[in-house]
Image (spheres, rainbow, N blue to C red):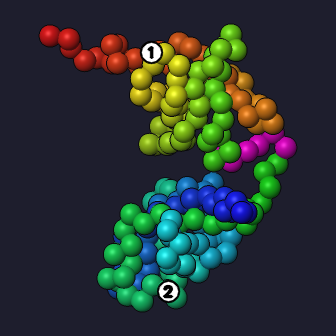
């Protein structure tokens, strides 16, 4: 049995633009035009494929696109929230000392003493910078979100499949200290 090719999410439809079936896409790429640079994209379930044509940048982090597979404004609007993916092989290889954020998912986390500190289950960005979501943390229930900064995650070794995170960054948001009242 062969492994399914790894796919990378390039963006998500955010609604219709105009009356001709153009769409707004929230891009997860370095430059908005790159959402249409790597060939056809597919929905997460693979049911639909789109040959995106970049028209122009929208507000920061958004692109206006067209695709022959989007027939109307209503079709574009119905796609709102649908994420689009490409095979990882379609992306250019990162330069030396660079990586894709997706490469972090699945890494084992260790603290500054080398003790197991869980694993990276996702990387998020809600607008204020990249955030690592750690799960399977020994001795703690639930997941923890820590900033992906040199201060909180000082070392990364992709070849070894490991990222070092400071124990203090993990424990700062423990359930007992998250601002909830015990009263």
Q: Is residue 96 above or below residue 68?
A: above
Whether 112 is drawn above or below 74: the answer is above
The tag earlier along the polypeptide, 1 or 2, is 2
Q: Is 68 contained in the magenta span?
A: no
Query: Magenta residues, as a range?
Result: 96-101
Q: Secondary structure at mark 1?
A: loop
Residue 91, above or below 131: below
Which circle marks residue 172 in the picture? 1
Across and down, in percent, residue 24 comes to: 43, 70
Residue 89's quadrant in the figure? bottom right
Q: Which residue is drawn at the image coordinates 52% and 23% (left, top)?
A: 137
Q: Position of residue 180 (x, y in %)?
A: 25, 18
Q: Is residue 51 visible?
A: yes
Residue at the image point whose x is 68% and y is 70% from the top = 38
What residue is disc 2 on? Answer: 69
- Which quadrant holds the C terminus? top left
């Amino acid at each position: 049995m062969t492994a399914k090719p790894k796919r990378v999410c390039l963006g998500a439809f955010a609604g219709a633009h105009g009356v001709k079936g153009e769409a707004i896409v929230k891009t997860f790429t370095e430059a908005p035009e790159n959402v249409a640079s790597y060939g056809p994209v597919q929905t997460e379930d693979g049911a639909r494929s789109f040959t995106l044509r970049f028209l122009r940048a929208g507000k920061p982090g958004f692109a206006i696109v067209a695709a022959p597979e989007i027939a109307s404004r209503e079709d574009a609007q119905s796609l709102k929230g649908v994420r689009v993916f490409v095979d990882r092989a379609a992306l250019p290889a990162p330069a030396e000392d660079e990586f894709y954020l997706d490469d972090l998912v699945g890494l084992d986390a260790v603290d500054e003493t080398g003790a197991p500190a869980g694993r990276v289950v996702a990387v998020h960005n809600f607008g204020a910078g990249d955030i690592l979501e750690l799960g399977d943390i020994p001795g703690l229930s639930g997941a923890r979100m820590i900033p992906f900064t040199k201060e909180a995650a000082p070392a990364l070794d992709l070849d070894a499949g490991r990222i070092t995170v400071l124990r203090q960054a993990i424990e700062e948001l423990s359930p007992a200290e998250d601002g909830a009242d015990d009263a």
